[in-house]
Image (cartoon, grey):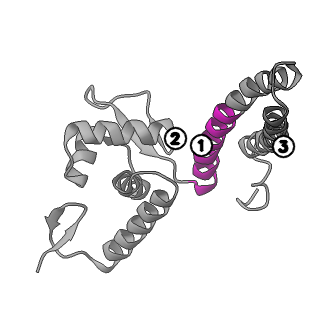
């Protein structure tokens, strides 16, 4: 009997391949929790277990995906630094390799996501604070509106302190502060 794995029918899997497929599925489920497409997580899992770089065509065949979907998946994984495009090419084809050190993968993935949050939110908050301050000081602002602006300003200043803390956390995470003992260093 044939078993389905990653979208295509294959011969029965060996016990090692069954275990590997279970871990690949767990990787995909875990990445899905953090907003990464489940299929992209499967691709990362497959690449994680490869002992060599893979071309887009090899990845496409292993996942049974269209070329455009595969390119999108690889681009997303490359942007999050879960996968790296190698400088050397094989037969004029780009090659990619997965980051297999979970500490580095975590570090890359979360620093990118958290930095984006800091940039987006601090930009919006810092743009709003001067306008709120002007409204508070404006003599034409009603007392009710002034009080609402003061409350908003209080909340946004609290948000700034959080995002300053988060920026420090991102900087420390990027710098490897949290991994000294954990990754065997």
- Asked if the residue at tag 1 contacts the one at tag 2, i.e. Cβ–Cβ closer than 8 Å, the answer is yes
Residue at 85% across, 26% down: 136
Answer above or below: position of 44 versus 154: below
Which span is picked out in magenta?
101-121
Q: Does residue 114 appear left or right of residue 165 in this picture?
A: left
Q: Which residue is mark 2?
A: 80
Quadrant the N terminus occupies? bottom left
Quadrant of residue 19 in the image? bottom left
Q: Which residue is mark 3?
A: 158
Give how far across and how far down residue 59 sits, in percent. Answer: 28, 47
Q: Residues within 10 Å of mark 2 (few under 14, many from 20)?
A: many
State whether the magenta stretch is mostly helix, strand or loop. helix
- Mark 2 or 1: in front is 1
Q: SS at mark 3?
A: helix
Residue 6 found in image quarter = bottom left
- For marks 3 and 1 on the same chain, the one whose residue lies earlier in the sequence: 1
Q: CA distance from mark 3 to mark 2?
A: 29 Å
- Count neighbours of disc 3 (C-alpha within 10 A) and say few if under 14, some if 14 to 19, many if 20 or more: few
Labels 3, 2: front one: 3
Residue 115 relative to residue 7: left or right: right
Q: Secondary structure at mark 1?
A: helix
Q: Earlier in the sequence, mark 2 or mark 1?
A: 2
């Amino acid at each position: 009997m044939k078993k389905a794995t990653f979208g295509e029918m294959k011969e029965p899997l060996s016990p090692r391949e069954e275990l590997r497929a279970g871990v690949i599925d767990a990787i995909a489920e875990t990445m899905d929790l953090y907003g990464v497409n489940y299929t992209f997580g499967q691709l990362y899992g497959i690449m994680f277990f490869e002992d060599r770089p893979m071309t887009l065509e090899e990845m496409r065949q292993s996942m049974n995906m269209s070329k455009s979907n595969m390119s999108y998946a690889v681009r997303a994984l490359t942007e999050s630094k879960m996968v790296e495009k190698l400088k050397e090419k094989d037969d004029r084809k780009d090659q990619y390799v997965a980051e297999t050190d979970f500490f580095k993968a975590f570090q890359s993935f979360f620093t990118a996501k958290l930095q984006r949050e800091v940039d987006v939110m601090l930009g919006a908050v810092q743009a709003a604070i001067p306008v709120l301050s002007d409204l508070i000081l404006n003599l034409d602002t009603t007392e009710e509106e002034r009080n609402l602006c003061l409350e908003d300003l209080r909340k946004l200043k609290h948000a700034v302190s959080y995002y300053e803390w988060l920026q420090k956390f991102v900087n420390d995470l990027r710098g490897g502060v949290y991994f000294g003992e954990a990754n065997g260093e």
